[in-house]
Image: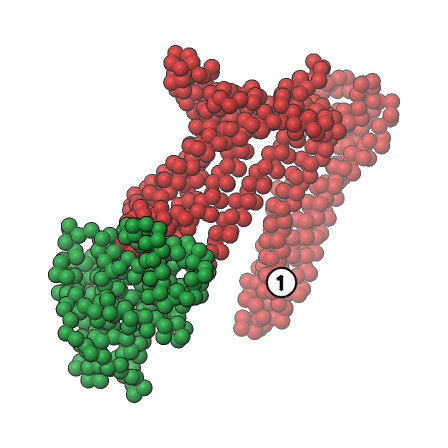
């Protein structure tokens, strides 16, 4: 672990954006998430690490209620964004997801043009006043996702025709185009090569200025590079949560230490 | 010896060969199956295969060739004078076969003895009467020559069958013996059996392909025959369909355009019904319905596909037609003259096509990756926005393919049209008029007493060819689109 470099960043004391308390998730009879309580700060990158099947992605998907689309999945406990219970019956999951964007593990551009992919969210939420406005949003989003220069000459080419790394950045552009407040990223670099990964990581750091970013990753180096705070999940429980530098240099729980030194997982 | 017995004996030889071959290989390996090249069962199968395949092949070829051979031998003995005015040698031969058949039955029923049947002469006894007694009607008085021919026919057939039995059994024994002698421990029985299986699979595939080619050629030759009798330009561009029936004389108008128009008009209405309903039910089933509802509704819709088309035809004739008459007939709007009309057939055909469209579209919508749905939901899209803007565009090529397949079925559909659309060939825009289609006219041109050399009958082949080219084109186009779509996500 000596090769790991920490970017010393000023971790300001930001206000809490997402607060989870005693969250439980069941897939049928399987108890997938047990008593997870965590407070995720605004304008911070929070990394979820842990071995496969430990529930990090499941917990991530609770935050924008993507688990609602799975029939057998049941979520209990208290999950608040900006102190508003997102599992309250009067919350519309559709509106919640507009506020909490998500980038998936595998790039999943729609079978549409690059432009239409990015314009999808703004169009369905009516975020643009007119065509020029929409053009601006698309350009701004693509620039923020660091892909504008590569695609500006072929905005109307199909999004499926891009390379894997470009597709993933397109999906990020698509997610930021709806102006979310929280961005959830489920292993966004697992299908990317090191160069594309570096670009996406740079982008995540950039996004931190405006959003609360939660990223699930299998790469501890990546967690160390991009995040300010890290949560370690093991067998459905949150084992340890704290400042990234603390977790990696001075873990409290022996399980965390075993995992980051490569003995379990 | 009847055929069933022969086949049973071949299979018995094969079964015995199986046991013996297996045993011999095992013995050869000193009883240790690990010394064998293949599993013991392969040695047995190899012997059985060698017993069955050559013998059955010889059997099939023999049965195809023997009738030709016998026919030509009998024909050679018949004098030219036997063909009377207005008759042909073919008719005489069919008399010969009938008499021979009658003699066979007479022997089986015990009316005649075996020797009697072989030696009886037409001059002394009244064959026609005695054959009539056993239930075989012969058209005219049986002449001496025909009687002789029939007796020769019987003898030749009997000898032929006898020889066939012997030869086939020889092949069965020979094959089994050959394979048995090879069943040693080193023999690669498994590879041999695998090759046999491969050959069987190839044979099955080629039968399907050869049949298609055969049908195509039959259509093609008869179509060419038709165009020799009737100008092709008049057929393809003629706007009148008025065949005169054989015997009455007079020239027929055999223009295909009214039929083509009727075919397309009815298919169009059918698709107008089937596409929206089928597509919407597919969307409901694949995106909204829970697994329980889906498990019940999907098979129920597919039951529609299992209803025979003649039943749909009855439904059109007896239910939908009268219903439409009440709604649009002379009592109300006066648009409709009779229950059979384009709209009747179109509606019912549309109902028939619903499961076709819905089942295929359902599969295609399900094939759209879940990742795309997640992506859309993750951006805050509702279910219907996701379906309209992501899933349907992604599935569109496949859905178009499904619709084209349904269209080609609509074009080829017969019974609903025969019963529901009427029989008048006309070029009209009014959907309440009776019209007819290519398929319905093929039926009406060939049913009844058709003289297969007149253009009125041969036109059926030209119509069939037109239909074949149309549906083939549509199918190829549809498959092309569906395949192109599949590549997108692989």
Q: How many marks?
A: 1
- Could you say which is closer to the camera, residue B150 or residue B80? B80
Percent of width and height locating residue B434: 51, 20
Identify which residue, B196 or B424, lies in the foreground. B424
Q: Is residue A40 left or right of residue B175?
A: left
Above or below, B445 against B410 in this view is above
The residue located at (25%, 75%) in the rendering is: A227
From the top left corner, tell me how far across and down residue B450 is, in percent: 67, 22
Colour convention: by chain
User: Which chain comes out green in the rendered image?
Assistant: A
Vertical position of residue B90 compared to residue B164: above or below: above
- Residue A149 locus on image (x, y percent): 41, 66
Q: Which quarter of the rendered picture does the N terminus of chain B lie within?
A: top right
Chain assigned red: B
Image point 29% across, 48% down: which residue?
B383
Question: Pointer 1: what residue?
Answer: B192
* Residue A26 in view, yes or no: yes
Task: Count residues near mark 1 (Cα–Cα under 10 Å), then give few for <14, some for 14-19, many for 20+.
Answer: some
The answer to whether residue B182 is left or right of residue A196 is right
Helix, strand or loop at mark 1: helix
């Amino acid at each position: 672990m000596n090769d790991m470099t920490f970017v010393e960043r000023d971790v300001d004391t930001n206000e809490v954006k997402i607060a989870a308390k005693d969250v439980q998730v069941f897939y049928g009879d399987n108890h997938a998430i047990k008593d997870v309580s965590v407070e995720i700060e605004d304008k911070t990158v929070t990394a979820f690490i842990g071995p496969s099947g430990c529930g990090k992605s499941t917990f991530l998907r609770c935050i924008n209620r993507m688990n609602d689309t799975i029939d057998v999945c049941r979520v209990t406990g208290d999950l608040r964004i900006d102190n508003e219970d997102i599992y309250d019956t009067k919350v519309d999951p559709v509106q919640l997801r507009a506020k909490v964007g998500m980038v998936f593990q595998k790039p999943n551009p729609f079978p549409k043009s690059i432009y239409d992919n990015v314009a999808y969210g703004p169009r369905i939420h009516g975020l643009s006043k007119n065509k020029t406005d929409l053009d601006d949003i698309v350009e701004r989003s693509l620039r923020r996702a660091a892909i504008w220069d590569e695609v500006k000459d072929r905005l109307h080419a199909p999004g499926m025709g891009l390379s894997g790394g470009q597709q993933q950045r397109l999906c990020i552009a698509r997610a930021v185009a709806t102006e979310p407040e929280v961005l959830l990223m489920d292993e966004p670099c697992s299908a990317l090569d090191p160069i594309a990964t570096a670009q996406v990581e740079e982008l995540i750091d950039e996004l931190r200025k405006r959003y609360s970013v939660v990223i699930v990753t299998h790469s501890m180096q990546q967690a160390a590079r991009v995040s300010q705070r890290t949560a370690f999940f093991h067998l459905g429980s949150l084992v340890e949560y704290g400042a990234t530098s603390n977790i990696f240099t001075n873990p409290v729980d022996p399980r965390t230490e075993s995992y980051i030194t490569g003995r379990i997982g | 010896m009847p055929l069933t017995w022969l086949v049973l004996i071949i299979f018995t030889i094969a079964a015995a060969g199986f046991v013996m071959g297996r045993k011999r290989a095992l013995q050869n390996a000193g009883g240790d199956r690990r010394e064998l090249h293949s599993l013991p069962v392969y040695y047995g199968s190899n012997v059985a295969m060698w017993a069955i395949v050559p013998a059955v092949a010889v059997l099939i070829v023999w049965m195809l060739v023997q009738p030709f051979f016998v026919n030509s031998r009998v024909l050679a003995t018949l004098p030219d004078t036997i063909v009377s005015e207005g008759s042909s040698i073919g008719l005489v031969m069919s008399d010969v076969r009938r008499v021979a058949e009658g003699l066979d039955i007479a022997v089986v029923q015990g009316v005649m003895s075996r020797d009697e049947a072989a030696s009886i002469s037409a001059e002394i006894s009244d064959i026609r009467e005695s054959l009539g007694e056993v239930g075989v009607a012969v058209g005219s008085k049986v002449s001496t020559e025909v009687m002789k021919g029939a007796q020769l026919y019987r003898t030749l057939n009997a000898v032929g069958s006898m020889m066939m039995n012997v030869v086939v059994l020889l092949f069965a024994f020979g094959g089994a013996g050959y394979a048995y002698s090879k069943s040693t421990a080193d023999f690669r029985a498994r590879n041999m059996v695998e090759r046999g299986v491969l050959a069987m699979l190839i044979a099955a595939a080629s039968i399907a392909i050869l049949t298609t080619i055969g049908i195509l050629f039959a259509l093609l030759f008869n179509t060419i025959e038709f165009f020799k009798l009737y100008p092709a330009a008049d057929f393809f561009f003629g706007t009148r369909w008025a065949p005169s029936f054989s015997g009455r004389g007079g020239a027929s108008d055999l223009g295909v355009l009214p039929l083509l128009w009727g075919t397309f008009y009815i298919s169009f209405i059918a698709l107008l019904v089937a596409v929206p309903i089928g597509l919407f039910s597919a969307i409901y089933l694949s995106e909204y319905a829970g697994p329980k509802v889906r498990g019940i509704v999907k098979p129920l819709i597919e039951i529609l596909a299992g209803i025979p088309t003649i039943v749909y035809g009855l439904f059109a004739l007896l239910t939908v037609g009268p219903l439409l008459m009440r709604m649009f007939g002379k009592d109300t709007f006066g648009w409709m003259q009779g229950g059979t009309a384009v709209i009747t057939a179109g509606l019912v055909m549309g109902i028939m096509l619903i499961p076709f469209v819905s089942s295929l579209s359902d599969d295609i919508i399900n094939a759209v990756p879940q990742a795309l749905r997640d992506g859309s939901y993750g951006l805050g899209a509702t279910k219907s926005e996701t379906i309209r803007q992501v899933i349907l565009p992604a599935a569109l090529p496949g859905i178009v393919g499904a619709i084209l397949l349904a269209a080609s079925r609509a074009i080829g559909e017969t019974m609903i049209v025969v019963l529901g659309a009427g029989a008048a060939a006309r070029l009209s825009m009014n959907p309440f008029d009776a019209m007819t289609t290519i398929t319905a006219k093929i039926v009406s041109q060939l049913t009844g007493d058709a003289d297969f050399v007149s253009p009125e009958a041969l036109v059926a082949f030209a119509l069939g060819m037109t239909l074949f080219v149309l549906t083939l084109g549509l199918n190829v186009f549809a498959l092309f689109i569906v395949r192109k779509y599949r590549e997108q996500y692989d």
